[in-house]
Image (cartoon, grey):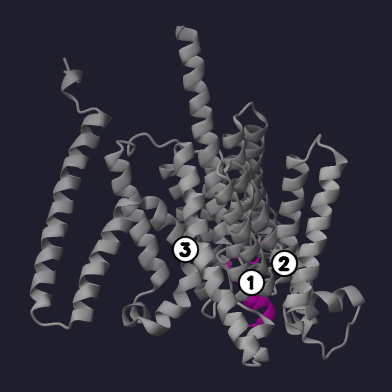
């Protein structure tokens, strides 16, 4: 007869791994200390300091998976500058480096918490799995094999990581709030530097740099999407701040983020933010007096007037020209609008020109080859038209199933009976997901919009720990 008691249980396995992890950390520290001691005899003081700070910084990221995860989410903000100024990252992609770090940090974090063998896959994982598998398979009939292969496997690695890592490590309210705080803490200094650069370029009379402001030359659309998500998190969290001083600082930080996002001069993110803001205000002021709504409206109008008065005309013209109806071929503010319209039309025509394309598309990455006759990275700048043209109705169904599963889970969780603090957390991540979801209809491809999956993962993570808390509370009530 088999002795089942002799079999190792998951907790015992996890403890074994945790013991090995401690030995591993000790070994890393000893080797690092030895390397620093040797380097101190031969290198300058500055390089010696770098040898100290880099291992310490890596070790801190190693034991703080939340910070490593937010850096992975923010990798595009720092990638270009690092690749141009840090020799190591000119040879090794910063995005890959920070994602590997987040992966290792998450793995050992799960070992320390004994969570490695208690992973619950959400229902939304099934359509995501099927969608990704079909995307990879579609490369077999795509005309853009090179871009299609890169696109599908990049989606598998980066988008999946941003979706599942939050589900793995965010298992209580404190972890969820910590994620939001880290994002805000990174975004505010970045916004300060961005405004400093903008003001400096205005004083220098540089039209090029004041037309669309961003951080260290990053794509303004990507920057606006990143800073907008941080602004939404801060906007929702301000009422949770108990001390009046912190609330004042919160409003000042929010103002700073909003001005910087507007200066990025990207209309898609601005429109997405307005929708998210209106939804938040409708939730927050539901059932309250009209006087509060009037006051809010006046504040918004004053803010807009101040912004249009302070920022240079090169920035504000992209909005005023649309309102005034100016449409000339020489007006560069309409260049991106016409590009989008052409891309959307081309994607629709490609998806509907024959029955096979309607059902299965032209294959992952095939839009660029079919429309531009080149195997290059190009896309329709609309996530649904992109999927419809390249993966057909089948891919569109799987992606819609995935989105619907996550959003319905988040909305149902929010509608349940929850404390105000918990409601604020889930609505913050839901609005950030909606913000990125709307932005995905105007800019980027599946991989450019990978931040959307980060907030979808956070929504699922919050729904998971809220459900477990309710189950535990219900179990305790039955025991009583």
Name the residue at 17% across, 83% down: 44
Q: In this rendered view, identify the residue nearer to me: 403 or 109.
A: 109
In the image, residue 472 sits, relative to residue 245, either above or below, namely above
As for residue 366 lying within the magenta part, the answer is yes
Estimate the spatial distance between the alpha carbons at disc 1 and disc 2, rounded to whole Å.
8 Å
Name the residue at 75% across, 62% down: 271
Measured as percent of width and height from the top left, residue 360 is found at: 66, 58
Q: Label 2: state its secondary structure.
A: helix
Name the residue at 33% across, 83% down: 87
Q: Dot 3: few (<14), some (14–19), or many (≥20) neighbours within 10 Å? A: some
Mark 2 or mark 1, which is nearer the start of the sequence? 1
- The residue wearing badge 1 is 221
- The residue wearing badge 3 is 153
Q: Label 3: state its secondary structure.
A: helix
Q: Residue furthest front?
A: 245
Proximity of marks 2 and 3: CB atoms separated by less than 8 Å? no
């Amino acid at each position: 007869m088999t002795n089942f008691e002799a079999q190792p249980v998951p907790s015992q396995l996890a403890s074994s791994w945790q013991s090995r992890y401690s030995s591993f950390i000790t070994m890393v520290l000893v080797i690092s200390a030895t390397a620093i001691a040797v380097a101190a005899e031969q290198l300058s003081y500055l390089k010696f300091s770098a040898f100290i700070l880099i291992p310490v910084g890596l070790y801190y990221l190693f034991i703080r998976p939340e910070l490593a995860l937010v850096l992975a989410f923010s990798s595009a903000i720092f990638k270009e500058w690092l690749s141009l100024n840090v020799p190591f990252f000119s040879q090794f992609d910063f995005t890959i480096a920070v994602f590997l770090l987040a992966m290792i940090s998450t793995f050992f974090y799960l070992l320390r918490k004994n969570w490695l063998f208690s992973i619950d896959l959400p229902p939304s994982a099934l359509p995501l799995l099927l969608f990704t598998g079909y995307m990879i398979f579609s490369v077999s009939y795509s005309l853009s094999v090179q871009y299609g292969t890169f696109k599908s496997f990049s989606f598998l690695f980066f988008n999946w990581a941003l979706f599942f890592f939050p589900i793995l490590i965010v298992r209580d309210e404190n972890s969820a709030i910590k994620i939001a705080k880290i994002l805000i803490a990174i975004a505010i200094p970045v916004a300060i530097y961005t405004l400093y650069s903008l003001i400096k370029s205005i004083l220098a009379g540089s039209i090029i740099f004041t037309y669309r402001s961003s951080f260290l030359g990053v794509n303004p659309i990507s920057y606006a999407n990143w800073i907008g998500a941080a602004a939404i998190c801060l906007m929702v969290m301000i009422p949770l701040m108990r001390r009046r001083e912190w609330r004042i600082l919160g409003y000042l930080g929010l103002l700073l983020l909003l001005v910087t996002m507007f200066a990025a001069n990207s209309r898609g993110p601005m429109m997405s933010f307005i929708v998210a803001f209106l939804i938040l205000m409708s939730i927050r002021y539901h059932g309250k007096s009209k006087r509060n709504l009037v006051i809010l409206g006046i504040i918004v109008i004053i803010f807009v007037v101040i912004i249009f008065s302070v920022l240079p005309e090169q920035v504000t013209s992209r909005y005023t020209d649309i309102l005034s109806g100016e449409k000339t071929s020489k007006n560069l503010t309409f260049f991106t609008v016409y590009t989008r319209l052409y891309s959307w039309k081309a994607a629709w025509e490609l998806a509907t020109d024959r029955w096979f394309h309607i059902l299965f598309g032209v294959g992952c990455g095939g839009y660029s080859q079919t429309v531009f006759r080149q195997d290059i990275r190009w896309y329709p700048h609309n996530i649904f038209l992109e999927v419809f043209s390249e993966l057909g109705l089948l891919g569109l169904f799987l992606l819609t199933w995935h989105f619907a599963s996550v959003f319905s889970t988040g909305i149902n969780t929010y509608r349940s009976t929850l404390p105000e603090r918990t409601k604020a957390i889930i609505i913050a991540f839901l609005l950030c997901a909606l913000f990125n979801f709307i932005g995905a209809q105007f800019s980027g491809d599946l991989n450019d919009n990978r931040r959307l999956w980060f907030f979808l993962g956070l929504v699922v993570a919050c729904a998971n720990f809220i459900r477990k808390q309710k189950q535990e509370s219900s179990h305790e009530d039955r025991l009583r």
